[in-house]
Amino acid sequence: MAETTALDGVKVVELCNLAAGPYCTKLMADLGAEVIKVEKPGVGDEARSRGPFLNDIPHPERSALFLYLNTNKMGITLNIDTKKGKALFKELIGGVDILVEDKPPGMLADLGLGYEVLSELNPSLVMTSITPFGQTGPYKDYKAYPLNSFHSGAEGFITPTGDPFPDRPPLKVARFAGEYEVGIHSMLATLAALYYQRATGLGQQVDVSKQEALIDINTYELLAYPYVGWFPNRATVLNPLGGIMPAKDGYGHLAMYEEVQWDNLAKLMGNPEWTKDELFTNPDVRRQRSDEVNEHLAEWTRAHTKYEIYHEGQKAGVATGAYQTPEEIMDSEQLKSRGFFAELDHPEVGRITYPTAPYRFSKTPWHGRRAAPLLGEHNEEIYHKRLGYSKEGLARLRGLGVV
Amino acid sequence: MGPLSGVRVLEFGMAVAGPHACKLLAFMGAEVIKVESITHLDMLRRAGVDAEKGAKILALRPGEPLPPGVMLDTFVSNTTQLNKLGIALDLTRPEAVELAKRLAARSDVVVENFRAKVMEEYGLDYPVLREINPNLIMLSTSLAGKTGPEREYLGYMEIFGALGGPGHLTGYPDGPPTWIRFSMDTMSAVSAASAIVTALIHKQRTGEGQYIDYSSCEGAVCLIGDALLDYAMNRRDQSRQGNLDDYMAPHNCYCCQGDDKWVSIVIGTDEEWNAFCDAIGNPEWTTDERFSDAYSRWQNQQQMDKLIQEWTMNYTHYEVMDILQKAGVAAVPSFNSPEIWGDPHLDARGLTVIVDHVTLGAQPVSAPPWKLSRTPAEITAAGPTLGQHNEYVFGELLGLSQEEISSLVNKGVIR
């Protein structure tokens, strides 16, 4: 394809599992970087063993999670615990710009594949390490699954917002959202280091703590405490007025932060009597008696569908929304008209629809070159064609369990 | 010196989505100039916290003057504007627009997240700026993007989460969807910043700038991409599942000693399960058939979670973390803000940075979230007061004389 991609010529090796690391390199691969995903022979990335699977039948090539997180990558297998595996890994690293890894701190160094060694081989290497608590500090060796990492970033404590059951536990946000957020943060830092590398030839180490990435994501929630000694919990609502509202067919959202939005809301509702009262017109009274205001608002929202609330509200100049389900998102006219979805072919799941990315680049668009790699799909391409191993040599490596 | 030093960014930002993106670039060493005006203030200059009911924004109608004596610096505006230079330009005045254009001509990147059509009305939209600076990178960030039937819709963070799907997929299975807040704004800011750095790398190689149309709703959709693929493959429309996982159990938060204290515990293997049982003293229930293998534990997790909680209730969440982590089991408190600011690990990592703000004094903020070994990201300055850097930007950068600047101030162009 002749289409220009922004990260054309950028070479990346990924040694990651599950969500945060793979999402980081997926974002780069989708923008044109060549990403070689290194997986353990036989088993592969943990995401392959987690569903949801096509027709709910477990299969390492049919996991929605894996397929989403690994678009546009090449995939090879390599056992870096073996001597030959280490040597091959070093050969690979010698020719790339970026390594993204998510092993426990010190593990690669113990294998003789730490930053010291790799940067000696390749001084322009940017090596990004993504771990639950970072490479240093008292918790660095603590174990954390995605749920633990999410709660370490303090957003769980305030989720769900305005909780009607305060005795129930704090929650994570949707599925692997926290891991994806960490992945985006890691991509940003890695590319900034690459920008510097392109200018100077010098690589460096990038230490990303999932906890700290999530703290940045939540910094505006967290900083109230040092200032006023107050902190949000699950009963807190950011704005006691409006918010999530029951609709005829689900839930809508009303957000009024400006007076003009209240004026517009009154018009939208047909200027009922109560909107002429100080309960509606006086911002201080409104805030003090927010429960009453919300009851009135709910009366109106219950009489409308969530999409009426969304579209009619927006057209009237109120910041309204609708809580959309995955099916409704896949059917969204707005998203379809913007070319947000792409279809990719995959030998095991066929041609299905994927979400692309939230940015439209005028010159270097998102680029769907291929679906996620099969386990070891590019072994021949990388070991034989790229690193020059003969087909027999490759067969021997397979026999020894290296590849 | 950060990795992006030498890059200049001109920000026409409001609230979080645009400003947080620019702040992250400033952490990396970019010079960010934020354009504001007393007539078009960043709304966070009006935002504060009310100890009872959370965030509070001073309500105003368009064109309504600020009440006298109102403070134009808040901890939130300081936090979004760290490391930036602040200038005051009333963009409703043609002379001000000319000055903004001169700055755009000397910038690598322009970022804007004003309401739909505002940049066009000012005459500062991409087609205009591209004429002045053909290799400019410009990013607009908005609720739904700049094309499509919803291109003029207005949205805040909670709307991103609602439309994008995380709202629907967050919550208790028997409860309503969730109103997700700042994380949706900051997430889209991080993502927008990554798009800008991507475009900078393209420009570095080819010399070519471009326009980037960022949609925060789509940013939120990308966070649930695997659920969309489930729909694409299986026509399953997923819903809320609390903290639970499709495979692993225990996988939840458990109540601990104290007021609203919780710890997250996840067990992914039989080895971890055995270590967990040992660590909690092998109570009899752990040998129950209902919990004898991973499948049974997942099936019977509701009963199991109650039994686990009977144990966690005897300890603080920090104690549970210590006991279980020593045994090799993943347990981490569900931290709240006081705990974040006082945690020994985060202290050792240097989370808290104190900046000296011109009007607010010493202000704690959170450090940049990545550690770069050669070109560290740093916080070098507090957020500017309105127009704090007029002298430097108009004088040194654009070469205006003292008299010219004073005259523009007198005419209300700089204000």
Image (tube, coloured by chain):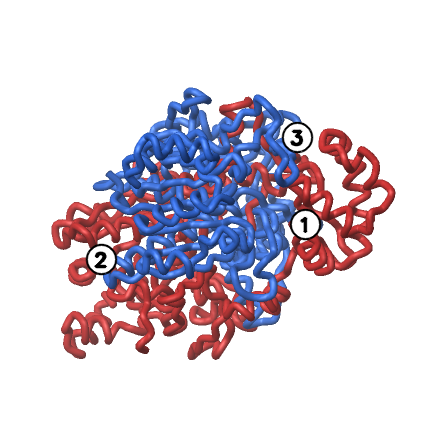
Q: What element carries label 3?
A: loop
Give x and y (percent) for residue A12: 27, 60
**Looking at the image, which residue is at 41% across and 42% down?**
A213
- Mark 1–mark 3 distance (CA, rounded to whole Å): 22 Å
Q: Is mark 1 on a helix, strand or loop?
A: loop
Asked whether the beta carbons under mark 1 and mark 3 sit within 8 Å of each other, the answer is no
Q: Nearer the viewer, residue A398 or A75?
A: A75
Give, as a three-letter code, the residue at label 2. Asp
Give, as a three-letter code, the residue at label 3. Lys
**Is B48 above or below relative to B16?**
above
* Chain of the residue that carries numbered disc 2 in the rendered image: A
Give x and y (percent) for residue B317: 52, 31
Q: Which of B343 and B105 is in front in this view?
A: B105
**The C terminus of chain A lies in quadrant:** bottom left
Q: Is residue B117 visible?
A: yes
- Crowd tier of the residue under label 2, counting other residues whose Cα lies within 10 Å: few below 14, some 14–19, many 20 or above: many
The quadrant in which residue A276 appears is: top right
* Residue bearing the label numbered 1: A318
Q: Are marks 1 and 3 on the same chain?
A: no
- Mark 2–mark 3 distance (CA, rounded to whole Å): 49 Å
* Residue bearing the label numbered 2: A97
**Looking at the image, which residue is at 72% across and 43% down?**
A262
Which chain comes out red in the rendered image? A
* Residue bearing the label numbered 3: B53
Color used for chain B?
Answer: blue
**Looking at the image, which residue is at 51% across and 43% down?**
B14
- Mark 2–mark 1 distance (CA, rounded to whole Å): 47 Å
